[in-house]
Image (cartoon, grey):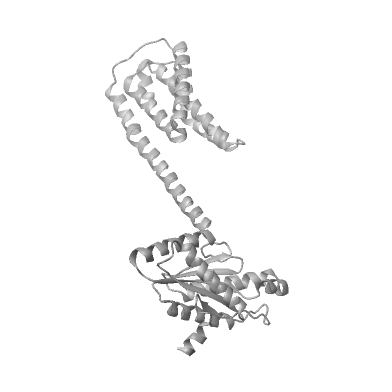
Amino acid sequence: MSAAMYPLDPAPWVWGFMWFNGLVWPHLAYQWARRARKPYHAEHRNLLIDAFLGGFWIAAMHFNPLPSATTISMMAMHNVAIGGLRFLLAGTAAQVLGLCVGLQIFAPALIPATSPVQLYACLPLLCLYPLSLGWICFRQAHTLGLQKRELLALSRTDSLTGLLNHGAWKDQMEVEFQRCKRQQKGGAIALIDIDHFKAINDTYGHVAGDIVLRQLSKMLKQNLRATDVAGRYGGDEFCVILPDLPLNRAAAVMDALRDRFATLGYEQSPALKVSLSIGMASFNPTHADATFWLNDADQALYEAKTTGRNRVICCGDGKPHHELLDSA
């Protein structure tokens, strides 16, 4: 801007106002917005003032083409980045207003030629300003992307156990059901219930109950394969997808989990004893959708809970898993 104004020999107050605009105003605007009750709205106001001043200086430079185009493009990029088309139009209106004020102060004139000094003075802005603005936009987009992924993960994760929540696990079950149907492969699902969990909460307190829930989730993470999908179905119920495993092998995995869990000791409550009832079902290609698969496991869990608890029941068998192995 100085290179464009120097040949015009402006009045001292113009030089003073130009230096204020370039060196003092940015810091003043930052502090103004920072201390505002609504910083975002204050920044919009400051950008409109910038646009007004840009129009003012275009008139002051007597419409010198390259400096004027540089000023307009900088303002346009800034306004689009901050508020899209709507704010671009508002910024353009502010520029026109600043231009009209400038025409009232300075004699209307047009300087169609741009000197080499003015050309080289504009080149750094033309190169560096889009680069810096692009970098800022990239950083914002990257940060928003990270936050979006974090929010998605939080929306799919149970906060207490770190496992998938009810909805996310059912989505995975639907995916697995369709995969089994498409590839004609087998798999199994398990529903796990902590026996007499309400009594644990009533007797030892909810803190002890939360410890039991977290301990079970920890065991699921440590003892399942990387391809298995565990989730918290709700309350004291957990759920597991075991892809590509025959039902008897999947039941053996769950029975081993049940044995380990029953032998746990709890330092805060040494008298606390825990056990698991587990219902299992294998993929059935005749089922129309995954809801029937889940219903099979739910029926097996009901049998496990009504026939003595602390056992693994597979859908259709009606016997605890260890009894099935003995009879085999």
Q: Position of residue 146 (x, y in %)?
A: 45, 52
Residue lying farthest right? 203
Residue 53: where, in percent of width, then height?
47, 23
175 on left or right of 265: left
Outermost residue toward the front in this view: 286
Which of the 4 image quarters holds residue 160? bottom right
Residue appearing at x 28%, y 21% in the figure: 115
Quick check: 44 above or below 173?
Answer: above
Give the total of numbered labels. 0
Q: Position of residue 16 (x, y in %)?
A: 48, 22
**Which one is in front, 173 or 53?**
173
User: Is 257 left, or right, of 199 in this rendering?
Assistant: left
Q: Is residue 98 visible?
A: yes
Q: Nearer the viewer, residue 259 or 42?
A: 259
* Side of 323 where 116 appears, left or right: left
Q: Residue at x 58, y 70 (%)?
A: 214
* Quarter of the rendering containing residue 199: bottom right
In this view of the protein, which residue sits in the foreground, 185 or 256?
185
Regarding residue 18, the answer to whether it shows in the image is no
Position of the C terminus, as image quadrant, is: bottom left
Name the quadrant of the N terminus. top left
Q: Is residue 113 above or below residue 224?
A: above
**Residue 107, x across and y down, in percent:** 41, 9
Q: Is residue 138 above or below residue 263?
A: above
Residue at the far left: name it: 116
